[in-house]
């Protein structure tokens, strides 16, 4: 599909699932991260893995340190919809460590299917983190979905917040003028170096094949103007800068 490097993320829904009496994963979070690490190790030039954990786990901090210092994982993925707010004090040790190490933290922002809860992923709670940790590189995934305008206003005031466009395939496919208008607003407000391409694959590849999604950004199907420099930066330049590759 023309993608040179992919970032894969570990999702830790198991902690909350077991707490609520739902079916949990058959493997522990340590093993789950190791499986992602194995993929990174086999394809180091094509795949980077971000460590994922529910920060409410007692060993969350020690696992994160191990993942970075012993395994070479390159960032942190948090999915607050499992039941915690990004600005919960329990998360702060993870942010302090990521800020110290210069690692990005990627948050899911926006809606999420049952049984997870979108209220925990409203962008305003990421704003609190950005203010308290101004040197922390934050990536807010999905433009906040329906909260895209809230996220835009927050990111304008917090220069350490970056965004990605993953999950917008449906809009790009069925309402391209809406999608490109929103993308144009983000680029005008934040600059292209804070807007990242993302796929939210593999399941959204069924909605729009990855090659088509890449093409929708590389060759925008709209009269709204986008420069080649902007396109190149969104498709890889911004991520390369964050990951120092």
Image: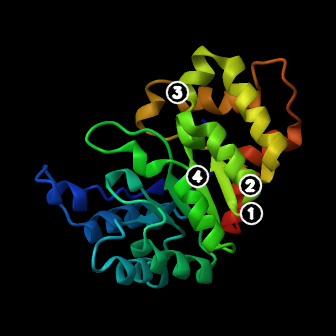
CB under 8 Å between discs 1 and 2: yes
Q: Is residue 156 above or below residue 171?
A: below
Label 3: few (<14), some (14–19) or many (≥20) C-alpha neighbours in 10 Å: some
Cα gap from disc 2 to disc 3, whole angstroms: 23 Å
Q: Which residue is mark 3?
A: 209
Secondary element under disc 4, as helix, strand or loop, is strand
CB under 8 Å between discs 4 and 3: no
Circle number at residue 238: 2
Circle number at residue 129: none
- Closest to the camera, between mark 1 and mark 4, is 4
Residue 167 visible, this angle? no
Q: Which residue is mark 4?
A: 140
Cα gap from disc 1 to disc 4, whole angstroms: 16 Å
Cα gap from disc 1 to disc 3, whole angstroms: 26 Å
Residue 214 image offset from top left, x and y in percent = 65, 33
Secondary element under disc 1, as helix, strand or loop, is helix
Among numbered discs 2 and 3, the one appearing first in the sequence: 3
Q: Residue at point 85% right, 32% down?
A: 226
Q: Quadrant of the C terminus?
A: bottom right
Q: Which residue is mark 1?
A: 241
CB under 8 Å between discs 1 and 4: no
Between 50 and 161, which is closer to the camera in this rendering? 161
- Closest to the camera, between mark 2 and mark 4, is 4
Secondary element under disc 3, as helix, strand or loop, is loop
Q: Is residue 66 above or below residue 46?
A: below
């Amino acid at each position: 599909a023309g993608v040179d490097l992919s970032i894969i993320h570990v999702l830790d829904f198991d902690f909350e699932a077991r707490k609520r009496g739902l079916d949990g994963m058959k493997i522990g979070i340590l093993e789950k991260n190791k499986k992602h690490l194995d993929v990174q190790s086999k394809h180091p030039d094509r795949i980077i893995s971000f460590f994922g954990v529910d920060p409410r786990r007692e060993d969350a901090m020690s696992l994160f340190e191990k993942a970075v210092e012993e395994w070479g994982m390159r960032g942190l993925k948090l999915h607050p919809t499992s039941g915690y707010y990004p600005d919960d004090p329990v998360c702060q040790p993870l942010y302090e460590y990521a800020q110290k190490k210069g690692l990005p933290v990627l948050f899911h922002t926006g809606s999420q299917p049952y049984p997870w809860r979108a209220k925990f992923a409203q962008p305003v709670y990421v704003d609190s983190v950005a203010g308290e940790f101004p040197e922390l590189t934050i990536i807010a995934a999905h433009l906040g979905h329906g909260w895209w305008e809230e996220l835009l206003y927050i990111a304008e005031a917090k220069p350490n917040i970056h965004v990605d466009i993953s999950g917008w395939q449906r809009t790009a496919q069925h309402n391209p003028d809406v999608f490109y208008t929103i993308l144009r607003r983000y680029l005008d407000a934040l600059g292209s170096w804070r807007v990242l391409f993302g796929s939210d694959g593999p399941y959204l590849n069924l909605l729009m094949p990855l090659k088509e999604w890449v093409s929708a950004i590389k060759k925008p199907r709209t009269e709204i103007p986008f420069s080649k420099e902007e396109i190149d930066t969104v498709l890889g330049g911004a991520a390369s800068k964050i990951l120092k590759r």
